[in-house]
Image (spheres, rainbow, N blue to C red):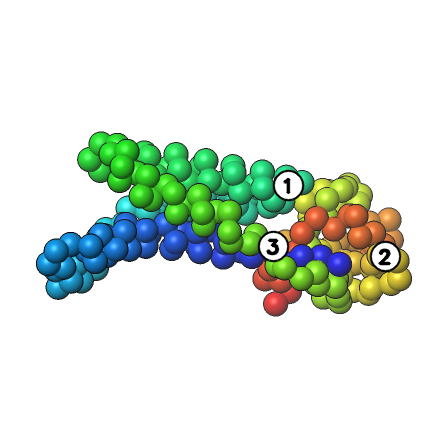
Amino acid sequence: MRKKINYFYPVWVWLTTLTAYPLTCFVATLFEEEPNFRHFFKVYPIVFVLSLAFSVPMLIICWISFARLIKTNMETIELKLVLFLIAATGLAITFQIMNGLNLPLFSIYAVPLLIGTLIFRIRSRKDEPVKKYDVFEVNREINPLVPKGSRGAILEVWEDGVFEVEFVGPDGQNIAYDGRNTYTIYFRDIGYYADPLSVPGRS
């Protein structure tokens, strides 16, 4: 059984962080003697668009970091904390570039960043069975032509976590070695699920 990876995890954390400041301002407006909601809804779109524009580069960096770290054997909580540190560092640098690091304003974004990092799931709640045509990354060398990190597809699912698989080269042809086009691997050899489009020759 495997847990599907939530590749939109960085996006959910990002959106949670972006909405922090406007929501904080809205709550503050509720406690004013004469709430000026008109002003709030006039300023909110501008703040959101500017936050969106300045934070996109950091989102890309976090997404790339997430895609690389998810391939490792790092525990989920460790992975989340590393991603938080990367994002928080990027957030601080962004503030510094814009108008200097304002700690109260930084905290308004950093706190929901931490909360979003911790509450959203990196992997699905339920285990899902490995099935035919699932695409995966192998976490050991199968042979000199299929090194660790190669991507393949499940052809047959046998009992007790044994699978018949194939690997496809950049030319879309099966990788053959020592007269074999398919290989037998075990559950422990499967690193993570991948997008079928990431394997040449498969759609």
The structure residue drawn at horizontal position 27% and vertical position 37%, both measured from the top left corner, is: 104
Residue 162 badge: 2
* Position in image of residue 121 (x %, y %): 55, 54
Q: Tell me where residue 100 sits by quadrant.
A: top left
The structure residue drawn at horizontal position 22% and vertical position 38%, both measured from the top left corner, is: 98
Q: Does label 3 or label 1 sit earlier along the sequence? A: 1
Amino acid identity at mark 1: Glu
* Position in image of residue 78 (x %, y %): 58, 38
Q: CA distance from mark 2 to mark 1?
A: 25 Å
Amino acid identity at mark 3: Arg
Q: CA distance from mark 3 to mark 1?
A: 12 Å
Q: Is residue 168 visible?
A: no
Q: Is residue 66 visible?
A: yes
Residue 194 badge: none
Residue 123 badge: 3
Q: Quadrant of the N terminus?
A: bottom right
Q: Does label 2 or label 1 sit earlier along the sequence? A: 1
Label 2 sits on a secondary structure element that is strand
Q: Which residue is mark 1?
A: 75
Q: How many marks?
A: 3
Circle 2 or circle 1, nearest the eye? 1
Q: Tell me where residue 96 sits by quadrant.
A: top left
Badge 2: how crowded within 10 Å, few (<14), some, or many (20+)? some
Label 3 sits on a secondary structure element that is loop
Asked whether 135 or 127 is in front, the reply is 127
Q: Quadrant of the C terminus?
A: bottom right
Q: CA distance from mark 2 to mark 3?
A: 23 Å
* Position in image of residue 139 (x %, y %): 72, 44
Q: Does label 2 or label 3 sit earlier along the sequence? A: 3
